[in-house]
Every structure is written in structure tokens, then in C-alpha cells.
Amino acid sequence: MNPALVQAEIAQLIQTLGAIGTPLQALLPAAAVLLVALAAVPAWRPLLGPAVAASAFMLLLGEIVLAWFHWRLYDLAVVMSPDTGRIVGRVAVPLWVESEKLYVWALALALMAVLIRRHRQELLPGVAVILAVLMAGAAIWGKPFTEPLPSFLGQYLGYLQAMGSGDPARMFGAYQGMEGARQFYYNTIYMWVHPPALFFAYATFAISFIATLIMVRERHSAFETTAYRWARLGYLPLTAGMLLGFPWAIIAWQGESWWWSGKVNMSIMMWVLYTALLHARLYLRRRGMWRWVATISIIAFLVLMLTYLATYIVPGAHSYL
Amino acid sequence: MTDPVRHKNWDFALTVITVALLGTLGVQSFIGTVYVWWAATAIPGFEVSGYGRFVWWMNAIAAPQVIALVVAMGLCVPKRLFGRTALVVVSGAMIAVGLGAWALTGSFGNGLAVYLALAALIQAVVVVMTVAGARGPSYLTEGRLVKTGSGLLHQGFIGFAFVVVALQRSAFMLPAFWIATALTLLGTLLAFYADRFAWRKTVRVEVDRSFADEPQG
């Protein structure tokens, strides 16, 4: 492995991704504005379905470009032991970390919005507004095409520089950090299952939230049934994703007080609220129970958003601060 | 047999208690998160000097809630098999055995583990009886597959609680965890989508209604 050569090839790859992805990234906020406009003006709503489908297609196209970028990066991002000079492995960076999180969430929601059948006309305006927020957020804060994977690339390029420095202490320190990240973070099965499961769940809960708001407005149980169907679809991957995090957390955060860290707290709270929602709706036939169900559903979604934001705001394990 | 109306009220009361406990734990989590957020910026060196104390307080506040939740879950399990009077006796006996284990070993965790093990045992009987189609277990839901799903997912949650309480440093932790996870996910799948897996399809008639028609008050 020649560190300088790898560094140059990665720089070339980032440049190519930027060249291909910049127009796509610029289209994201434009599409977001269009979606909000179509959702806001009732006369334009017949165009909302095709606009959502076009957004889904655009996001999917971008995801294919990102997948290609990750595949090329996997080829380049080798980790070599300074002791033996042997390559110990490659870094498989998942497609839903760092700059790509909001993008993947938007993609999941867009694909689901295309698939909505029951109460489609009623749900689409609200779902389109949430999709617009996610797409704009992906372009403004994520920037997956122009500023890809800042944390990983920062660490990996630092590792390459250390490996090229010839200083054994620096080389060994950088190798330990990179190999630890490779084994316990990027390449773990957990990182390939937990985030996509949660983004799938988040997308279904967004649709469930919109159905709940319509239930409150219309005061009709049919919308509660729709909200429930989307919530139950998300509850399974949410539970699976969170449960699978448990054995990983015990190993990866050994010695850290992760149990009460902000993100874990909020995640538990979110799961608890969706569990409470699915229990409470069993008694929907009771007088006034729909108000409780609606309240829990709305709070649960607000907590979901706070849970996502907690990663960037609250310090502790599972924090990117 | 128990009066079905009473049984439903008992079910409702336990559901309300469970939801309320889940809610209070959620509120505690939220307050804890906001506190850490504030403390990290307002208290210099909080992560080094103050975080340990914060964790201690969070554990101390959560412990009675978690115990109450475990007891509520413990009550939920035998409620499917026993009438109300027998339920009180069985639940009281489970708590007594748990307390006895605590007193004998001097470890609260052991007491909780014994209590959860008893709950898991009863739940296993409930699941077997449900799968066999026995009339005994009572559920809020209809259909054997849905009931089996509900039984399995509760078995999975009890198993997961047992892993957290008793097996975190054991060689059995991972196998027990995977079994609990599989039961939970299979149970959730069956409880939510039983109609897709059912051998004999039944058409469930959903009666849509307006909430505006409900009497006020």
C-alpha cells in the first residue's frame, strides 16, 4: 500500500462524486420547494403524486451514485498493520452514516409515499411536506455529494498521512484508531442493519403521524386504522434495530456509561411511546380513548424527531459531538 | 370461569398502569437528556466529575419504576391463565419467591431474576396452551395466530428483561439474547400480520365510525 497514491485516488474519487452529484444535490431544495407548493395549493394537488414519484426517482438515482462511491471507496480504503506491513482488511462504510443519514431517510419516505394506497389523496400533502423538509435538510446539512463522509474521510486520510510519516509511534496510534473503527463500527453487521431498520421505521412513523393529524381533524376511526397500519409496519424494524444494538453496545461501549446517554435515553423513550400507542389503541372503542391515542401518537413522533436530533445536540455515547 | 367484563376491566387497568409506567420512564429519560445537554455546557468538566453522579441518580429514580413495570408485566402474564382471586394469590406468591431469593442471596438482582424466571415459565405454559388451542388463556385479541403472536412477543420481552437483569456477564448472554429477540420479532410479526399467515382466512370486518358522535364528558 502506497499511502500517497491511495490519498490521491480518494481525492480523485471525491472529485468525481462531486461532479456527478452536484446537480442532483442542487435539485433537492428545488424539489422540496415544489413539493411544499403543490401540497399547499389545493388546485395543484393532482400534480403532487407525480411530483412525489419524480422525487423518489431522483433520490434513488442519487443513491445509486452514492452506492458506486462507497464501492470504489471500499476498494481503496485498506488498513495495513505497521508491524507486519500486511493489509488486515478494508473499511466497508455503510450507506447511511454521517452526511447520508437524512438522504436515506428521505429516500425511504419517498418510496413509501409512492406505495401509499389507503387514504392516498388525504395523506400525500402532509407526507410531501415532511419529505420536502428531509430533502432540504439532506442538501443543506448533509451534503452527501459535495462533502461526503467528513468524519470517516478525516480519520482515514489522517491514518494515511501517519502511515506515510515513517514515525512508528504516530503510525501505530493511527492504525489502532482506524482498525478499531473498522472492526467495531464501520464493518460490524450492526451498522449495516440497525440504521436502515430505523430509517425504514422513521419513514412509516412519519406517514402514521400525518394519518393521526387527519384523524384529529376528521374525528373518524378510518384514519386511526391507517395510522395504526403504518405504525405497526414501523414497530417491527424499530424493535429489531434497537434490540440488535444491545449486544453491540455492550462490546463497543465497554466501560462507558451508555445506558443513560442522551441518544439511548431518547431512543428508549421513543420505543416506549410507540409501545404505549399500540397498547392504548386496543381500547379505541372506549369513550374518548381516541384522544389519548392521538396524543400519544403525536408525542411519539415529536420524540422521534428529538431522538434523531439528540445525536447532534446531547453529548455522551452514540453522540457525534 | 371469570366474568369476561371484569376480566376486560382488569386488562384495561393493567394496560393503563403499563402505559403510565412507560410514560413516566419516558419523561425521566427526557428530563435526563435535557439535563445532560444543559450540564455539558453549564458545568465545567461535567463528563468527568458529574456524569457518574448523574447515572447514579438516574438509576435510583428508574429502579422503582422498572420494578413496578416488571411486576405489572408479571401480573399480565398469569392474568391470561387465572381468575382474579387466583391471580392475586399467584402474583403474591411470585413476588414472595422473588423477595425470598433477594433475602437469601443478598442480591436484589437475583430476586428480580427469580421473579422474571417464574414469569417466563408461566408465559411458556400460556404460549403452549395457546398454540394447542386450549380454552384457558384469555386474550384481548381474537384468532389463535394473533394470540400466539402476542404470547410469543411477551415471552420475548420477559426473556430480554432476564438477559439485562441476570445474564449480562454470562456466557449464555448471547444465545439467550438471540432467542429472546427471535421470539419478540416472530411474536410481533404474528400479532400484527396473522391474517397474512392464517391457513383459514377470515374476513375481519372493520366498522368505521365517527368520534364526533361520541357523547361528551
Image (cartoon, rainbow, N blue to C red):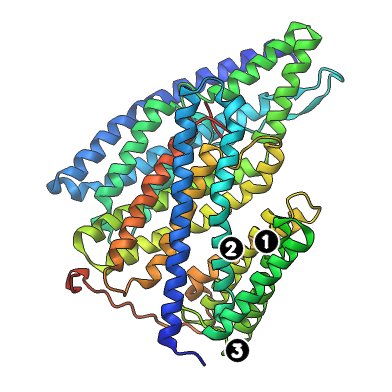
* Residue A87 seen in this snapshot: yes
**Left or right, A303 with reference to A252:** left
- x 52%, y 43%: residue: A265
The amino acid on which the numbered mark 3 sits, given as a three-letter code, is Ala
Chain assignment, label 1: B
Q: Which residue is mark 2?
A: B70
Residue B161, above or below A139: below
Return the x and y of residue A176 as percentages of the image width and height.
75, 23
Relative to A56, A245 lies left or right? right
Q: Secondary structure at mark 2?
A: helix
Residue identified by numbered label 1: B112
Q: Is residue A235 above or below residue A321?
A: below
Total numbered labels: 3
Closer to the N terminus: mark 3 or mark 1? 1
Q: Are dots 2 and 1 in contact, CB under 8 Å?
A: yes
* Among the two numbered marks 3 and 2 on one chain, the one whose residue lies closer to the N terminus: 2
> SS for tag 1?
helix
Of A250 and A30, the residue lying toward us: A250
Q: Comparing marks 3 and 2, which lies closer to the viewer?
A: 2
What is the x, y in percent for residue A135? 36, 35
Asked whether, in this view, residue A54 is left or right of residue B135, the answer is left
Disc 2 from disc 1: Cα separation: 9 Å
- Cβ–Cβ under 8 Å for marks 3 and 2: no
- Front-most of residues A65 and B214: B214
Question: Mark 3 vs mark 1: same chain?
Answer: yes
What label sits on residue B134 in the rendered view?
A: 3
Name the amino acid type tagged 2.
Val
